[in-house]
Amino acid sequence: MPTPDPALIDTDVASILYRARLFRHVMPTGLARVVADRPLAISVITLGEASYGALSRKWSSRRTAEMLAFYADSFACVPQLSAGLGHVPG
């Protein structure tokens, strides 16, 4: 059976997955079906938004490190591909 295509998730979805795993919040059933058994990726923008959110909410360094460890363990991080912007393949 082929590996499913990865899903690039946004900040809201990454946050839902974080809360579901670490705080035992309920994940919406539809989302659970979409992300089940497939590799997940976030953009550097999502990583930056999560870091900024922790900073603006004055999270402790321990809590911030736990969130970042969860992100590192759970998601591939897609680098910003600014060099390819505006390029039309073909």
Image (spheres, rainbow, N blue to C red):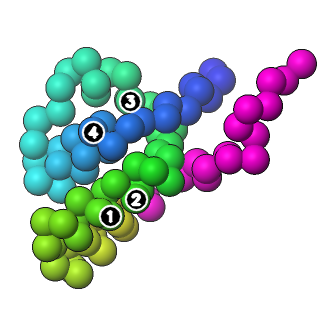
Of the residues shown, which amino acid type is indicated by label 3? Val
Q: In this view, does 84 lie above or below 89?
A: below
**In the picture, which quadrant includes the C terminus?**
top right
Measure the alpha-carbon separation of dots 2 and 1: 5 Å
Task: Report the Cα–Cα distance between label 4 and label 2.
Answer: 13 Å
Residue 48 is marked as 2
Q: Nearer the viewer, residue 82 or 18?
A: 82
Where residue 13 appears, as percent x and y from the top left, is 30, 37
For marks 4 and 2, the one nearer the N-term is: 4
Which of the two discs, 3 and 4, labels the residue nearer the N terminus?
Answer: 4
Q: Specify the amino acid type for callout 1.
A: Ser
Task: Kindly give the residue lying farthest to the front in the view shown.
Answer: 86
Which dot, 3 or 1, sits closer to the camera? Answer: 1
- Residue at 32% over, 64% down: 51
What's the distance in space between the residues labelled 1 and 4, CA to CA?
Answer: 13 Å
Residue positioned 57% across, 25% down in the render: 4
Q: In which quarter of the image is residue 5?
A: top right
Q: Name the residue under label 1.
A: 51
User: Disc 3 designates what residue?
Assistant: 35
Read off the magenta span.
Answer: 72-90
Q: Mark 4 points at which residue?
A: 12
Q: Is residue 79 left or right of residue 89?
A: left
Binning the other alpha carbons within 10 Å of mark 4 as few (below 14), some (14 to 19) or many (20 upward) gives few
